[in-house]
Amino acid sequence: MSVPSCCLKGFEWDGAPAGRIGKLANNEAYISGDNSDVGVMIVHDLLGWTFPNVRLLADHYAREANVTVYVPDFFGGEALPFGPILNGNWGEIDVPGFMMKNSREIREPEIFDCARAMRRKYKKVGAVGFCYGGWAVFRLGAKDHQPPLVDCITAGHPSLLIKKDIDEVAVPVQILAPEIDPVYTAELKTHTFEAVTKLGVPFDYQHFPGVEHACFVRGDDKKAGEREAMARGKNATVCWLRQFLHDS
């Protein structure tokens, strides 16, 4: 399976993550926050659970939405190197081989296991996924989970998403959608509107004009509008989590 290079672009924000390392189910995880009632799991993109940006996002969610956030490692201890990705040297990276080891079929069971562990621990659970994590949060919110594994989802520039994932979602759905996205295509965007609005679940579609796939984690201040989109995406996610994970 090939992955467009836009899925791999990254930009390291200033600042140092303030969380801690622990476990979720059988997975190593970055953890931020201390709310004992409300938890959120981030399913990371192809840069993995150690990428500073995703950990900084976890810190923001924990503080601003008053939740405990987990970023588990879903790549089995492996990570694509940041340097070649940030410098655009794609030839140094075996992306097809990496994706074969981290396909949907291989990683879905442990993603479900981590969500089940959170459901046992917390009264309310949310899931946020970027790029690679986008398909995963739709699967976490699928109707076949009874009782539900999560109470709401947010998907930012999702990849590996298929129409069946969209058709079967059964929890409140938020989409963060860049205008320029060869992965979350115009066809999938249209299908999302047509399908989710018929499912009887709360639906929030956030359109981000002029920015491209990966903007919500990368936040590159050298790209016009991208840092603003990153901040707007973070704020939208925080509001969504607060609305559906807190009683008041």
Image (cartoon, rainbow, N blue to C red):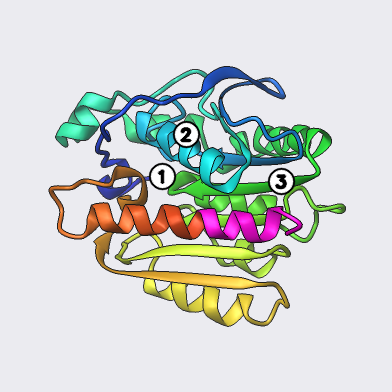
Residue at (70% x, 72% y) in the render: 201
Query: Residue 100's mark?
Result: 2
Q: CA distance from mark 2 to mark 1?
A: 7 Å
Rendered location of residue 194, percent (x, y): 57, 82
Q: Residue at x 55, y 64 (%)?
A: 174
Secondary structure at badge 1 equals: loop
Which amino acid type is shown beneath numbered disc 2? Met
Residue name at image x 37 percent, y 29 percent: 51
Q: Are marks 3 and 1 in contact (CB under 8 Å)?
A: no
User: Helix or strand or loop: what does disc 3 sit on?
Assistant: strand
Looking at this view, is 95 or 14 the one in front?
Answer: 14
Mark 2 or mark 1: whose residue is earlier in sequence: 1
Magenta-highlighted residues = 238-248
Percent of width and height locating residue 149: 77, 47
Task: Point out the frontmost of discs 3 and 1.
Answer: 3
> Residue visible at 50% across and 64% down?
175
